[in-house]
Image: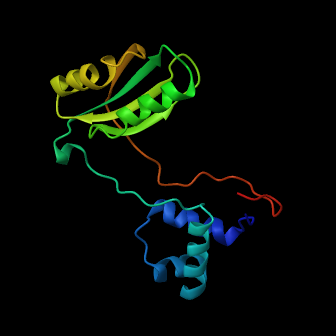
Amino acid sequence: MRALDNTDLQILANLFRDARLSNKDLAREVGLAPSSCLERVKRLQNDGVIQGCSLKLNMNALGAHIQAMIAVRLSNHNRETFESFMQAVQPAPEVLSLYHLGGDNDLLIHVAVVDTQHLRDFVFNTITCRNEVSHVETALVYDYRQSDTMPKFVLNSSQAV
């Protein structure tokens, strides 16, 4: 994979802030001709640097008035157990994100639900009912903010992403 240059990083930072930018606006922001900008974006996609785009939603507007982080410990720590658990939980409509962790807890599941009964039912019906689960802790999320600023990493010309 080729090394990223400053122009690539500028493109990524602008798209990280707003993935809806038109190619024309993006090209203007980074000082490229639109055709050159589009070629670079396509190359970043083909190289797997850009892996997709997502949509930020107001969960309250959709009726999901409670968000929670659910920490899970599994009784068995082999790859098959983790994969099986994650494949069973991830498709649930309540799940926003799923993290495999090191440390005391094995997984962290970010969920959005309608109310506390929905949260309780999700925990019982999706998590604690599974034999491989040995411990669950649920923490309510009072506020959630996601940065729109791409992390800045120093890449020299010999480093590839």
Residue 22 location in percent, x, y?
A: 43, 77
Residue in the image at 37% along x and 38% along y? 90
Scheme of colours in the image: rainbow
Q: Quadrant of the C terminus?
A: bottom right
Q: Splitting the image into 4 quarters, where does residue 88 fall?
A: top left
Q: Quadrant of the N terminus?
A: bottom right
Q: How many marks?
A: 0
**In the rendered image, the vertical position of residue 26 relative to residue 117, given as above or below:** below
Question: Farthest residue toward the right?
Answer: 158
The one of 136 and 17 positioned closer to us in this rendering: 136
Horizontal side of 76 relative to 85 (left or right) equals right
Residue 136 location in percent, x, y?
A: 38, 16
Residue in the image at 56% along x and 62% along y? 13
**In the rendered image, the vertical position of residue 81 relative to residue 160, given as above or below:** above
**In the rendered image, the vertical position of residue 150 relative to residue 71, given as above or below:** below
Q: Splitting the image into 4 quarters, where does residue 117 fall?
A: top left
Residue 77 location in percent, x, y?
A: 55, 20
Horizontal side of 11 relative to 65 (left or right) equals right
The one of 105 and 132 positioned closer to us in this rendering: 132
Horizontal side of 137 relative to 81 (left or right) equals left
Residue 74 location in percent, x, y?
A: 47, 17
Q: Splitting the image into 4 quarters, where does residue 118 fall?
A: top left
Residue in the image at 33% along x and 35% along y? 143
Residue in the image at 48% along x and 34% along y? 99
